Image (spheres, helix red, strand yellow):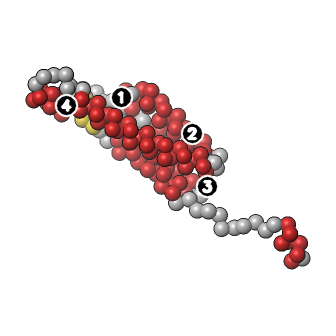
Amino acid sequence: MRLNTLTSFCGFVILIAALYCPILRPFHLFNMDAFGANRPYGMVLLLIGVVGILGTVLNQFKLTRFVAWFSLVLVVLFFIGAFLKVNTSFSFIPFRSIDAFLTRQIKFKWGWYLIFAGPLLAVAGVLFERKRNFIPPSSENSQTKA
């Protein structure tokens, strides 16, 4: 396995592992992973990670490139959605000070670093993919030299 393929593979494995890491801690009571925050979106990210691993193992460069970029877009959308959900969760309360206090009680955890690191590694592996320098000789060129 080449280094670029290994980098993409590690990125997809980190993405899958990061889905089980804590990303939110509401009111200092418990930790939420991606499935606790949004189960369908977590399942989509898990499926994307599995497809990315299959693409790297089966040497499907175009599929791996598409899935790497798609996973990065999905993770960015997931973060934006979580950020907006946290900041608008208590907007129904008419008192801004209570709303701000309750919003500050929901903390983002270290799992976001891993969730972003996975697709970034996968995209880095895809971006620095080299084209083959070796061009196999055709049958006409090998017959004329002999």
Spatial CA distance of label 2 from label 1 is 22 Å
Which of disc 1 and disc 4 is earlier in sequence?
1
Q: Is 141 situated above or below 42?
A: below
Q: Amino acid at mark 4?
A: Thr
Disc on the earlier residue, 4 or 3: 3
Tag in front: 3 or 2: 2
User: From mark 4 to mark 3, how far is it between C-alphas?
Assistant: 46 Å
Quick one: SS at disc 3? loop
Quarter of the image that includes the C terminus? bottom right
What residue occupies the far bottom of the structure in this picture? 145
Under circle 4, the secondary element is helix
User: Are the two marked residues, 4 and 1, in contact with CB atoms closer than 8 angstroms?
Assistant: no
Which residue is labeled 2 in the image? Answer: 51
Q: Position of residue 62 (x, y in %)?
A: 60, 49
Can you give x and y, in whole percent of width and height, for residue 77 in the image?
Answer: 38, 38
Counting other residues with Cα less than 10 Å from the Cα at mark 1, is it few (<14), some (14-19), or many (20 or more)? some
Q: Residues within 10 Å of mark 2 (few under 14, many from 20)?
A: some
Mark 4 to mark 2: distance in Å? 36 Å
Give the foreground label among 1 and 3: 1
Mark-to-mark CA distance, 1 and 3: 35 Å
**Would you name the residue on which mark 4 appears?**
103
CA gap, disc 4 and disc 1: 16 Å
Pointers 2 and 1 in contact (C-beta within 8 Å): no
| Badge 1 element | helix
Q: Amino acid at mark 3?
A: Met
Taking 97 as reference, is 76 left or right? right
Q: Which one is earlier in the sequence, the residue at label 3 or at label 2?
A: 3
Which labelled disc corresponds to residue 69? none
Percent x, y of residue 1: 61, 55
Labelled disc at residue 1: 3
Residue at image mark 1: 37
Residue located 19% across and 22% down the image: 92
